[in-house]
Image: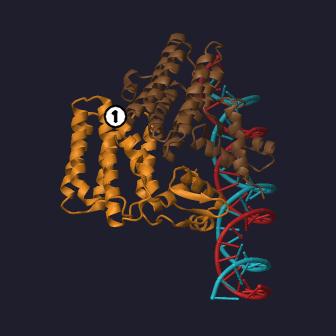
Chain colours: A orange, B brown, C red, D cyan
DNA sequence: CACCCGCAGATCGTATATCATTTCAGATAT
DNA sequence: ATATCTGAAATGATATACGATCTGCGGGTG
């Protein structure tokens, strides 16, 4: 009868709590506790946690347990690099599939982003940003690449409350770039140009975040300088 | 005492049999049978299979069971597209890390590939091809991208015995391209050029395979034509 | 002959129980 | 005071048992 298995329900349960920030990075996921809370046994909970581990949202150590992934600066860099790569490709692959309606929606979302700049609401801005890019990559005909994009975004979401996700000085520039990417798509530009534009859009944000980071805590930088150059280029 | 958990052992066991071809695509993985064969209970076997599912090597249906993934033509296209994307990036990111020794080894492997062309041993050629590319991407400093490359190759391995993996007329060209990629790396070319060269190298193989396919069974083509253009470019 | 129903076997899904490992507090010795 | 040892508690890992769901076959019915 149950449309979804208990392990799936456990997965959704934990996932929701990670997404909405109730389980913050470092939060310890104890099988027994979660099982009791959901009124199921530990077996499906275990399976759910291992799935989350495979998605990179949770770290797991044998005979020790699981916790919501602690994403350090290097980790963050790697995740963003990967997202830049796959999201750029997904955007380019989507481009030819987009209808005028898609583009209209994207413009509209971006306009809302521009207006939201006045309110200085980073959370809202981040939400709209995801919505904007979703419109651009959701039509990607390659499900593997699309899946990788989703994974990247999910990992980003884990960082919701950390200082990683938003840089004030970058927001306006970001919105402008959105429009430029839409221009490229509308004029039927070379897919490779679209891909690289979308990629640069993200690596520019990455660079801004890193610069912001090193300004506010200059010591913690364990990021090798030239590493990101290849993917940024 | 046991260095690895039983679920890990089950994972390795199944994985090895998929890799060496004893479990061919479509082969049904029955929890109870594998558990008996390994003398463990079904729980760790289940976990191993779900992990393989997450990696795309196995498909799983609730209350029905698992089987080694059946990769159809569209699936193959998507996998190769993704591999082209991530392997290109991994190669570019590795490039600056490579020592003269790496390059020497790569040249050497490629020379062996060239010699092996006379023997017409597709299996050997494919093995050497993996070894060659491994040298180029294993130094990739981004573990996520490197992991994606490995996943792509693993999925390729599932196809070992199918007609997907080798195109006679393409082999020589492929070996020549290998040398050209090495030239780019040696001369310290722009990482983006290296990335796109490595990507093109793979998409060219993809196109050759698809052409070969449609020659030998002209009807089965469910591949939309222009889809791959973005990533090929 | 085609279609539907229902039973039986196979297989997965989960609960419960037990074993193994880790962790940490507290005792003890130096 | 510090370091090391020890044992109990917490927690994960696995085995076993049972229940749920699917599949395929065989017989009945239109």
Q: Where is residue B227 in the image (x, y as percent from the top left)?
A: 39, 26
Q: Residue at x 31, y 63 (%)?
A: A215
The total number of labels drawn is 1
Q: Which of A149 and B175 is in front in this view?
A: B175
Q: Where is residue A74 in the image (x, y as percent from the top left)?
A: 45, 55
Q: Callout 1: residue from which chain?
A: A
Q: Residue at x 58, y 65 (%)?
A: A34
Q: Which of D5 and A11 is in front in this view?
A: D5
Q: Residue furthest front?
A: B100
- Picture quadrant where residue B49 is located: top right
Residue B137 horizontal side relative to residue D26, left or right: left
Q: Residue at x 30, y 45 (%)?
A: A201
Q: Mark 1 points at which residue?
A: A92
Q: Which of A6 and B226 is in front in this view?
A: B226
Can residue B104 be seen here? The reply is yes
Q: Where is residue B137 in the image (x, y as percent from the top left)?
A: 52, 37
In this rendering, the answer to whether B188 lies above or below B120 is below
**How dense is the environment of label 1, judged by Cα within 10 Å: few (below 14), some, or many (20 and up)?**
many
Can residue A45 be seen here? The reply is no
Q: Position of residue A165 (x, y in %)?
A: 35, 58
Q: Which residue is drawn at 20% across and 47% down?
A: A176
Q: In which quarter of the image is the C terminus of chain A?
A: top left
In this rendering, the answer to whether A40 lies above or below B32 is below
Which element type, helix, strand or loop, lies under badge 1? helix
In this rendering, the answer to whether A101 lies above or below A41 is above
- Picture quadrant where residue C21 is located: bottom right
């Amino acid at each position: 009868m149950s449309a979804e298995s208990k392990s799936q329900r456990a997965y959704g349960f934990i996932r929701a709590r990670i997404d909405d920030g109730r389980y913050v990075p470092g939060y310890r996921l104890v099988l027994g506790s979660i099982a009791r809370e959901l009124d199921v046994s530990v077996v499906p909970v275990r399976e759910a946690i291992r799935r989350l581990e495979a998605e990179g949202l949770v770290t797991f150590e044998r005979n020790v347990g699981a916790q919501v992934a602690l994403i350090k600066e290097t980790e963050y860099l790697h995740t963003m690099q990967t997202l830049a790569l796959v999201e750029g490709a997904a955007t380019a692959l989507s481009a030819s599939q987009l209808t005028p309606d898609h583009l209209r929606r994207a413009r509209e979302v971006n306009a809302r982003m521009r207006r939201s700049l006045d309110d200085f609401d980073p959370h809202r801005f981040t939400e709209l940003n995801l919505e904007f890019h979703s419109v651009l990559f959701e039509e990607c005909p390659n499900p593997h690449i699309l899946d990788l994009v989703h994974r990247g975004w999910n990992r980003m979401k884990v960082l919701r409350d950390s200082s990683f996700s938003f840089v004030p000085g970058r927001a306006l520039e970001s919105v402008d770039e959105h429009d430029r990417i839409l221009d490229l798509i509308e004029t039927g530009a070379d897919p490779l140009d679209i891909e690289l534009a979308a990629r640069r859009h993200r690596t520019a944000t990455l660079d801004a975040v890193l610069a912001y980071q090193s300004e506010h805590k200059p010591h913690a930088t364990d990021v090798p300088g030239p590493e990101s150059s290849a993917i940024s280029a």
